[in-house]
């Protein structure tokens, strides 16, 4: 069903980002990434107090493929 879209602003799009306005059947990713981060890595805010004196990030992953994108065109 068509929609009326008002004004919008795009500040930045990453290398594998998708911007879609209008009708769509399928949106398929064309890139994949695996991110490892320790405790308190993605905290955002004005006045944070994070106390992580001892932490460890487990980066062992025994499977070869987490999210296959081979068939995405």
Image: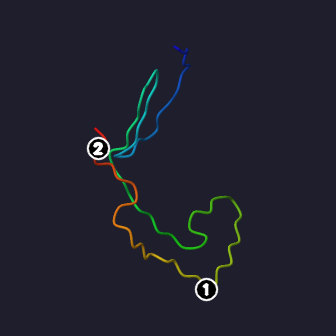
Q: Quadrant of residue 50?
A: bottom right
How many tags in the picture? 2
Which residue carries the number 2 mark?
A: 71
9, 41: nearer the viewer: 41
Q: Residues within 10 Å of mark 2 (few under 14, many from 20)?
A: few
Q: Residues within 10 Å of mark 1 (few under 14, many from 20)?
A: few
Compared with 59, 22 (above or below) is above
Q: Residue furthest bottom?
A: 54
Which residue carries the number 1 mark?
A: 54
Residue 62 picture location, percent across and down: 39, 73
Residue at image point 53% right, 14% down:
1
Residue at image point 36% right, 45% down:
16
Going by the image, does 2 lie left or right of 33? Answer: right
Residue 11 picture location, percent across and down: 46, 38
Q: Quadrant of residue 44?
A: bottom right
40, 72: nearer the viewer: 72
Q: Quadrant of residue 4?
A: top right
Residue at image point 34% right, 46% down:
15
Q: Secondary structure at mark 2?
A: loop
Residue 51 picture location, percent across and down: 68, 78
């Amino acid at each position: 069903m068509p929609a009326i879209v008002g004004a919008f602003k795009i500040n930045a799009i990453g290398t594998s980002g998708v911007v879609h306005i209008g009708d769509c059947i399928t949106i398929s990713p064309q890139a994949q990434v695996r991110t490892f981060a320790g405790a308190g890595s993605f905290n955002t805010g004005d006045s944070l107090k994070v106390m992580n004196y001892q932490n460890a990030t487990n980066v062992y992953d025994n499977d070869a493929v987490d999210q296959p994108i081979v068939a995405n065109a």
